[in-house]
Image (cartoon, coloured by chain):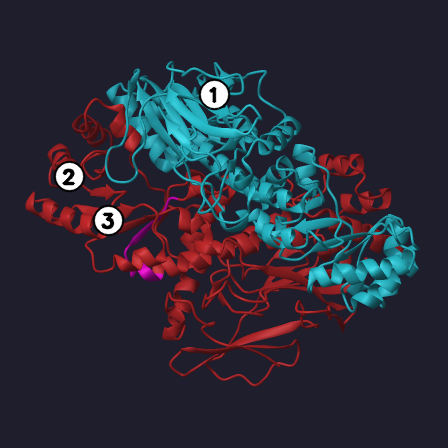
Chain colours: A cyan, B red
């Protein structure tokens, strides 16, 4: 499917005017960055780059797209002809997925003619803003869970396609599995799920429902025990599955108290290895608050897919260089810095990150052995490079990057960015 | 494209267990409702139903979907065979799009076998929760704009497909146009856009950029005047286009002050019919705050596509009846009311809404001539009825429905639902 119309109207009218006046071919650099992190957040997680590269590959104006643009009178004939041949042939460098970012970090650098680059603005921002917002929230939740299993189950609380991307972003950030089957197909993410309250209600008794589930899915299944009465539900669950029962899930009530009671009851019934899964409006704070409780897994929905209060990352896509000349908007508070940039992150000898250093491209400052350049080549002549990481590699990259964050930067409370950004 | 895997894993495992124990064929009623409105909101707007009916039509397990489920070992052979033949053959009634809803309003009633109905849970909720959240926020913005043009331009701040659905929801709620070209193609929504700051920066001078834009798009275009200095920008804009200039857009700064200055300047230059478009982090509150200013159009982005603080509507899909027997979860705070329901809205003689009355289906209370039943038939034997409204009709329905809201219910400030819901 073509992604070409996932684009704002003005990109094509700008293109039309630029084709007409001869500026469309000027070599340009566009950069993606976030002016700030969501309020109080201490780091952001880059996500979506892999999806973006696929979307750029599919950015083609085929007959259907051209017919629509002609019919709606969006652009003139000359522009339609140009779009019919559109293939991105430029260069893209950027932070690999799973890398941390801070205010002003140049996450993506697109080098192409004005025409080739300007039409990618909306697509690039939609994908990066969404996926990075979800991954950034997810990383905080994974940190709060402190190694326990995390299951993403928020599909029902967001747009049906955003759900698939959210599952991917959550997995990148360290979630164990998702409920979303399409995310399993499209991104190879493990999927999980057993039964909802509806299954219990469908049956004449809770016991019948549990017996049926165990017969169908095995004793290692997860039984949802809070449809009627949790204590009774747990007793019936162990009766139905035996002490080999895989897990019980509690989806409502005071999860800390209930988890403790459930653990005691399960142990007393000999189900010492039966795990406890909790879910129900969890966010990073409630996950952290359950740290001392006997919880084995968290199911997280709404707060994950809505970015836990920050549903978009607020990144922008700005023209910073034309024909080798730095350009920048100069009015009011929305200033940006002109010119193509390079970026490195300085670290202490211990590996702890110290600062993000953004410099004019070609003027790289002296770097110590613990410093690291952050952009990698993503597209060359429009084609993906060998350096584009897999989802598994990005997941590992984030895990490693979070180890470098100064300890204050990992606090859940509101605060300043974990490291400062210095512009040379 | 099949929508079948936009589904949570547990729906298929429930189905597998129910097929095995013989309960999958039990006739069931599922209902969609919101336990509450987002905090402080006074009404909700139903949106997404039209998209949902299309998605149910496309809910087919073809070879690719079945292969994935087999490979990932999600369900057994018997279930795969059942899914291969899946077509929704049941009945769906619901609130038409553009109708208002309140806590507990039964927005959608799905009547089908357990198997046919349970697999639609995630798809139905994803679409309704997303689209209703956006439409509900959009309706408040349209009210705040008090008849002025509203342009949706938030695509870059949300998932690329959520962007298309957001444009649709905004249009339903009364927005005039969208920047999103795919929304133009898919939903017939007018699209709009001219130029961004990048176009000005591309050129050697602002004047060259403006002249080029006017040549390409005509004097009736909108010139973005805040790249360098707004006063100078407006002077250059009128110089380039003449006093017939269509509009100027201001995207930064104190929009009220700037709009007033721009109006005076435009008038003094003889451009008395040139309109003023403002944009830049607008939400319903800042739109309302500009009511006294000479603003002709608002461009709204981030706050629209993120639901202005409420990015999801929080609707749930609950099994309420099995074999004619009401069923309901009974533990803790997440209670629901068993049994299929009917619903009507009572109105004063003046047409002002008084209350939402939810009653056990078949026990309809006496209704006055101003009262109105709220559900309409949407699917019969799995096929859309003639009563399914078009997007234009839904837009008109919302406009009419908002007129019935008691005046307190239209306030932007936080408060209680505009009318109470009574459960008989």
The percent position of residue A23, horizontal first and vertical second, equals 27, 20
Subunit bearing disc 1:
A
Q: State the SS at label 1.
A: strand
How far separated are the C-alphas under marks 2 and 3? Answer: 16 Å
Contact between labelled residues 3 and 2, with CB atoms less than 8 Å apart: no
Magenta range: B143-153
Q: Mark 1 points at which residue?
A: A93
Q: In this view, does B165 lie to the left or right of A31?
A: right
Distance between the alpha carbons at the discs numbered 1 and 2: 37 Å
| Quadrant of res A118 | top left
Instruction: Tell me the residue that label 2 is attached to.
Output: B234
Pointer 3 local density, CA inside 10 Å: few below 14, some 14–19, many at least 20: few
**Which residue is labeled 3 in the image?**
B254
In terms of image quadrants, where is residue A319? top left
Residue A376 drawn in magenta: no
Query: Which secondary structure, mark 3?
Result: loop
Label 2 or label 3, whichever lies nearer to me, is 3
Image quadrant of residue A125?
A: top left
What whole-number distance in Å separates the C-alpha atoms at marks 1 and 3? Answer: 36 Å
Q: Which of marks 2 and 3 is nearer the N terminus?
A: 2
Helix, strand or loop under label 2: helix
Residue B23 seen anywhere in this rendered image of the structure: no
């Amino acid at each position: 499917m073509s992604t070409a119309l996932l684009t704002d109207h003005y990109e094509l009218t700008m293109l039309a005017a630029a084709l007409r006046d001869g500026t469309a071919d000027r070599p340009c650099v566009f950069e993606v960055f976030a002016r700030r992190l969501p309020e109080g957040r201490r780091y952001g997680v880059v996500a979506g780059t892999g999806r973006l590269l696929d979307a750029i590959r599919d950015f083609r104006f085929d007959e259907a797209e051209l017919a629509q643009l002609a019919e709606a009178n969006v652009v003139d004939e000359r522009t339609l002809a140009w779009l019919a041949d559109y293939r991105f042939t430029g260069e893209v460098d950027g932070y690999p997925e799973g890398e941390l970012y801070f205010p002003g970090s140049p996450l993506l650098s697109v080098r192409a003619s004005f025409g080739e680059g300007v039409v990618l603005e909306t697509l690039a921002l939609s994908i990066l803003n969404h996926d990075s917002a979800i991954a950034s929230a997810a990383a905080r939740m994974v940190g709060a869970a402190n190694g326990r299993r995390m299951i993403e189950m928020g599909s029902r609380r967001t747009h049906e396609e955003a759900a698939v991307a959210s599952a991917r972003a959550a997995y990148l950030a360290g979630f164990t599995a998702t409920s979303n089957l399409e995310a399993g197909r499209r991104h190879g993410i493990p999927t999980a799920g057993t039964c909802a309250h509806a299954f219990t209600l469908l049956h004449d008794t809770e016991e019948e429902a549990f017996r049926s589930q165990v017969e169908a899915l095995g004793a290692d299944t997860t039984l949802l025990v809070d449809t009627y009465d949790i204590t009774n539900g747990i007793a019936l669950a162990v009766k139905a599955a035996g002490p080999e029962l895989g897990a019980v899930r509690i989806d409502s009530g005071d999860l800390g108290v209930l988890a403790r009671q459930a653990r005691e009851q399960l142990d007393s019934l000999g189900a010492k290895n039966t795990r406890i899964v909790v879910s129900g409006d969890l966010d990073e704070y409630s996950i952290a608050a359950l740290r001392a409780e006997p919880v084995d897994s968290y199911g997280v929905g709404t707060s994950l897919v809505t970015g836990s209060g920050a549903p978009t990352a607020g990144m922008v896509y700005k023209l910073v260089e034309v024909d080798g000349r730095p350009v920048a908007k100069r009015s009011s508070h929305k200033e940006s810095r002109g010119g193509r940039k390079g970026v490195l992150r300085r670290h202490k000898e211990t590996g702890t990150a110290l600062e993000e250093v953004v410099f004019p491209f070609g003027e790289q400052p002296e770097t110590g052995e613990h410093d690291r350049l952050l952009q990698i080549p993503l597209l060359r002549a429009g084609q993906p490079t060998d350096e584009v990481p897999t989802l598994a590699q990005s997941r590992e990259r984030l895990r490693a990057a979070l180890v470098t964050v100064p300890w204050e930067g990992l606090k859940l409370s509101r605060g300043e960015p974990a490291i400062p950004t210095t512009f040379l």
